[in-house]
Amino acid sequence: MKLKTLAAAAALALAPVMGTAQQGKLSGDVVKIGVLTDMSGLYADYGGPGAVAAARLAVQDFGGKMFGKNIEVVNADHQNKPDIAKNVTQQWFDREGVDMTVENLNSSVALAVQALGKEKNKITIVTGAATSRLTNEDCAPGTGIHYLMDTIALGNVVGKAVVKDGGNSWFFLTADYAFGHSLEKDTGEVVRAAGGRVNGAVRHPLGTNDFSSFLLQAQTSGAKVVGLANAGGDTVNSIKAAAEFGITKRQNLAALLMLITDVHAIGLNTAQGLYLTEGWYWDLNNETRAWADKFSKVMNGRKPNSNHASVYSATMHYLKAVQAAGTDDTAAVMKKMQETPINDMFAKGGKLREDGRMVHDMYLFQVKAPSASKGAWDYYDLKGTVKGEEAFQSMAAGRCAAVKK
């Protein structure tokens, strides 16, 4: 009798979950996720195949099905061109039944895709782009999500730390598009607020190969710190060029957006000593290491960067929200995503705000010297953890007109 009673109780406990699975409704009888990324250009290591692999791992770990229907992942290479990104996304939404796009790497791409998602009432999750405009002037409450980092958090963590350490005069080497402009502006404000000064800035085209003229201007500025307001291949190339020119012997470099894949490309001999901000690191704890091992098995031994981890987390959070809502309706899913804290290998206590900002802890790292590294991908020393509420802009200070403060 006791066994029968326990079995009955277990069946009742499982009934709501099973009922949701049986009664859920999907548009087009499928959940379709689009990973929009740079598959072959200067951000291919930053996102690229690793981002696609991360989204597919999330679907696999979720179980591959939603209410008995398939979950599909499609991907496209936007070639870092907003017009191509917009055309691909419009086709995804209008003709191919894509329910959500993720990564949307490159700030110009992200702004275009988020605006289209708002128009089409489709969820767009940005992980790979960093401009703070995504949750400020160009916010899209109800459809747009900014998940990994933004230029305000990047400036808050590295900018404050470097000024505190004596780097009180800055010159910016800036990528000439939305992301670079935001990062220069936001970090400059942090530097000034901390008591430092900005001596000037020079802007370079996206995908620059020759940084000599730009670095000469940085050298003649007299600034103690050259802030690299760029990312991906541009950061890698500018750091290598600075080392070749001997600038690092007289001035310090501050890599404002640098991921572990960039450090891997540069090498510890050149990157050692750099301070940088990250939202995640594969060697933080047992949980991050376990996921990194899983990722490495499908990526030929390469470790994931924070962008790859955030694609996995964002995709999983979306799928769980669809399951909990019992539908892929945008409003219902977004409501669940905002109500549910994010507790996974990427973030603990992460919270999705009404303006689209996902608030989570950020980390200050210093790149190890070669002698301190145990081997490939053992590159960071953790110097500090900054709580999400301190790293990211507050709702009260935000410029998202559609959100009540």
Image (tube, rainbow, N blue to C red):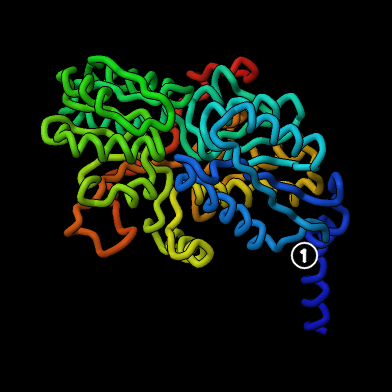
Q: Looking at the image, which residue is at 72% across and 61% down?
A: 64
Q: Is residue 5 placed above or below 337 in the rendered structure?
A: below
Dot 1 amino acid type: Ala
Is residue 257 something one can see in this rendering?
Answer: yes
Residue drawn at (20%, 44%) of the image: 273
Q: Quadrant of the N terminus?
A: bottom right
Nearest the viewer among 336 and 77 is: 77
Q: How many marks?
A: 1
Q: Is residue 49 left or right of residue 315?
A: left
> Which residue is under mark 1?
13
Which quadrant is the C terminus positioned in? top right
Residue drawn at point x = 84 percent, y = 48 percent: 26
Crowd rating for badge 1 (residues with CA inside 10 Å; few <14, some 14–19, many 20+): few
Q: Nearer the viewer, residue 233 or 98?
A: 233
Task: Decide if residue 390 is in sight here.
Answer: no
Q: Residue 401 at x, y = what percent?
A: 61, 15
In the image, is 169 to the left or to the right of 338? left
Identify the image quadrant of residue 159: top left
Q: Nearer the viewer, residue 29 or 5?
A: 29
Q: Position of residue 242 (x, y in %)?
A: 22, 34
Farthest-out residue, left = 250
- The furthest residue to the front: 210
Q: Is residue 324 above or below residue 217?
A: below
Q: Residue 62, position in %: x, y? A: 67, 60
Q: Is residue 279 left or right of residue 106?
A: left
Dot 1 falls on a residue whose secondary structure is: helix
Residue positioned 75% across, 52% down in the render? 323
